[in-house]
Image: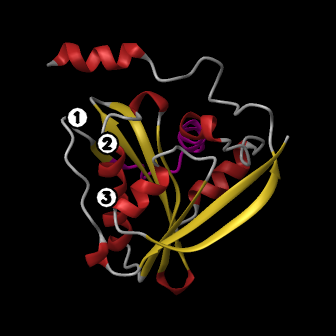
Amino acid sequence: MKTVVKTYYLEMTDPADLKQSRKSDISLEVQRAEIPCPELNRFLYTAVGGDWYWIDRLKWTYDRWLIYVSRPELETWVGYVAGTPAGYYELEMQSGANVEIAYFGLLPQFIGLGIGGQLLTRAVECAWAMDAARIWVHTCSLDGPAALDNYQGRGFRLYQEVVSEVDLPQEAPGPWPGARKSAQVEQWFWRRE
């Protein structure tokens, strides 16, 4: 199906531009995945991006994933809630001391719990720690409805918009059928209080 997609390119050029996210009642721990692991990156890619038409890499072979995640310029960071992966980001060092937030997002059951801003704040802090001169990211009209607001809320400035037409399946593939935000996860948080 032909779909019109608007892509937004954003940047941050000074560490002082970072605006901290509001605190959440949910504790988020972020840890770097230091050992290249294609299975982990592919899991995160499909679990986070399945509802947002992240389909470009679904046909990648294991070897292609291994080459991608083994590059020294790529870092993968995972956010955990109570020991469970809740989201991730990939940072890629590029020429000119540019760092791209190549991938960023939350697993479906953790969207709307107030941790997306925390995870993005941590991503920006980690990118600056890579001696970046500039951090950039892109999002599009297919991404989660809070994505653009989250980037701008953390201090990213829009520098380009591109409208294109892409051919997409009728529905986003999801990580697998039925994988949507679950009331069970919300109940788990309430039971812990």
Residue 73, image x, y percentages:
52, 69
In the picture, measured across the screen, residue 97 lies left or right of residue 161, that is left
Bounds of the magenta span? 31-45
Residue beneath disc 2: 115
In the picture, measured across the screen, residue 180 lies left or right of residue 55, that is left
User: Considering depth in this image, is 84 or 183 the residue closer to the camera?
Assistant: 183
Q: Quadrant of residue 20?
A: bottom left
Label 2, label 1: how many angstroms apart (C-alpha)? 7 Å
| Amino acid at the residue labelled 3 | Thr
Are the residues tagged 2 and 1 within 8 Å (C-beta)?
yes
Element carrying mark 2: loop
Element carrying mark 1: loop
In the picture, measured across the screen, residue 103 lies left or right of residue 50, that is left
Residue drawn 41% across and 35% down? 111
Residue 181, image x, y percentages:
47, 23
> Does 30 appear in magenta?
no
Q: Quadrant of residue 25?
A: top left
Residue 112, image x, y percentages:
37, 35
Q: Quadrant of residue 190?
A: top left
**Quadrant (top left, top right, bottom left, bottom right) of the N terminus:** top right
Residue 113, image x, y percentages:
32, 34
In the picture, measured across the screen, residue 92 lies left or right of residue 64, that is left
| Amino acid at the residue labelled 1 | Ile
Residue beneath disc 3: 121
